[in-house]
Image: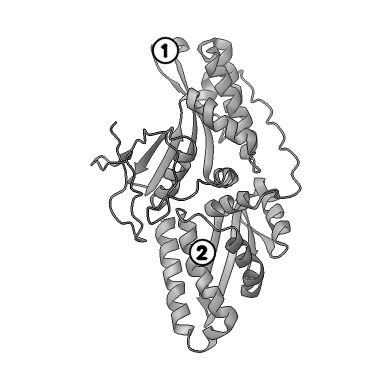
């Protein structure tokens, strides 16, 4: 059994690639994990409990994508090839977390590295794997963002493919109708090739009035949350925030209601939920992530650790005296790592 891995030695944060009998290093920087034995690892490489199912859903709500591609291919029936993929694309430093997510899903799928964009991507595209692992998971642990509607439509395409209806003219047109309603709609080429096909109506999101499980929130913050720190005019600010597109404003409202503090602010085409008071962060945000910690394989756990240290110093008042220089250095570290991760 041969496996290739996209991770060499220590990364920027001193994490080692999780040691596993299914992993060996190779020069082409791609990852193909073939052992379906479910495991999970900490940043140090020690085995840990498997990721919580709702963490996986929350992280997928933030970073996942249910993609359908329809491409022209001469020689195939009707000259069109259909591919349905569940994928998660993140910064390359999140490889340990992607490995844990892959193992949560039974080891199926592939992880590949995009060197140019500093990104790693986990993708599952085999219909059999999707039916066995992906669809049952998201039916049991539903998404809360508009990706829930994407998932419902995407699942219809999987059903069409499994029943071989994508090999018929009617089946292709049905897939095009679905494709027009998810992600970014149809490309100009597909729209020109199927001018009479209309987009299917997107299913309405289930009415959700509250976040039922904190593990979903932990996963969502691992993807779209931020533990930030700034110094301006000799004033230190530590903030917690979550950013979403306007179409998922309702999710930020649920998060605000869950914590009971903070505000929601518009910033162009996106909205930010923000807790900007370090006192509120200490009294509400810190206790939550202490009781429901971010998995150690998650890069955001590293950011949170530094942010927590600075927050505790500020709450004690020591940043006004002996610890001020240390807090400033801590803030520089937080912003350096966040900047490296965003680029």
Q: Residue at x 33, y 54 (%)?
A: 16
Where in the figure is residue 14, as x and y percent of width and height?
34, 60
Q: Can you say which quadrant of the picture contains the C terminus?
A: bottom left
Q: Residue at x 69, y 65 (%)?
A: 262
Task: Tell me the quarter of the picture where residue 291 sits.
Answer: bottom right
From what the image shows, is residue 223 above or below residue 25? Answer: below
Q: Is residue 77 visible?
A: yes
Protein image colouring: one colour
Q: Residue at x 58, y 20 (%)?
A: 159
Tell which of 341 and 189 is nearer to you: 341
C-alpha distance separating marks 2 and 1:
51 Å
The residue singled out by tag 1 in the image is 76
Tell which of 248 and 324 is nearer to you: 324
Q: Is residue 180 visible?
A: no
Mark 2, Cα crowd under 10 Å, few <14 / some 14-19 / many 20+, is many
Where in the figure is residue 17, as x and y percent of width and height?
34, 50
Which badge, 2 or 1, comes first in the chain's sequence?
1
Tag 2's secondary structure? helix
Q: Nearer the viewer, mark 2 or mark 1?
A: 2
Q: Can you say which quadrant of the picture contains the N terminus?
A: top left
The residue singled out by tag 2 in the image is 304
């Amino acid at each position: 059994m041969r496996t290739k891995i996209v991770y060499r030695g220590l990364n920027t944060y001193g994490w080692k690639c999780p040691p596993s009998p299914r992993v060996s290093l190779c020069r082409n920087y791609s990852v193909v994990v073939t052992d379906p034995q479910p495991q999970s690892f900490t940043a140090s490489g020690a085995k840990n409990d498997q990721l919580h199912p709702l963490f996986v859903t929350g992280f997928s709500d933030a970073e996942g994508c249910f993609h359908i591609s329809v491409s022209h291919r001469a020689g195939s029936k009707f000259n069109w090839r259909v591919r349905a993929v569940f994928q998660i694309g993140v910064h390359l430093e999140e490889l340990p977390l992607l490995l844990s997510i892959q193992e949560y899903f039974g080891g199926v799928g592939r992880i590949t590295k995009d060197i140019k964009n500093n990104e790693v991507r986990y993708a599952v595209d085999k219909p059999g794997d999707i039916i066995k692992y992906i669809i049952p998971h998201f039916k049991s642990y539903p998404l809360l963002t508009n990706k829930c509607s994407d998932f419902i439509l995407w699942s219809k395409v999987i059903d069409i493919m499994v029943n071989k209806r994508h090999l018929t003219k009617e089946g292709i047109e049905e897939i095009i109708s679905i494709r027009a309603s998810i992600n970014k709609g149809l490309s100009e080429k597909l729209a020109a090739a199927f001018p009479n096909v209309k987009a299917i109506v997107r299913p309405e999101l289930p009415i959700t009035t509250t976040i039922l499980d904190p593990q979903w929130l932990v996963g969502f913050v691992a993807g779209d949350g931020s533990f930030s720190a700034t110094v301006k005019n000799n004033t230190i600010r530590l903030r917690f925030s979550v950013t979403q597109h306007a179409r998922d404003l309702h999710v930020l409202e649920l998060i605000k209601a869950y914590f009971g503090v903070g505000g929601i602010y518009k910033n162009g085409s996106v909205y930010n939920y923000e807790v900007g008071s370090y006192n509120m962060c200490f009294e509400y945000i810190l206790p939550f992530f202490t009781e429901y910690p971010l998995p150690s394989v998650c890069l955001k756990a590293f950011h949170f650790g530094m942010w927590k240290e600075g927050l505790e110093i500020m709450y004690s008042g020591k940043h006004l005296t002996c610890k001020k220089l240390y807090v400033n250095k801590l803030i520089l570290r937080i912003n350096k790592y966040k900047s490296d991760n965003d680029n």
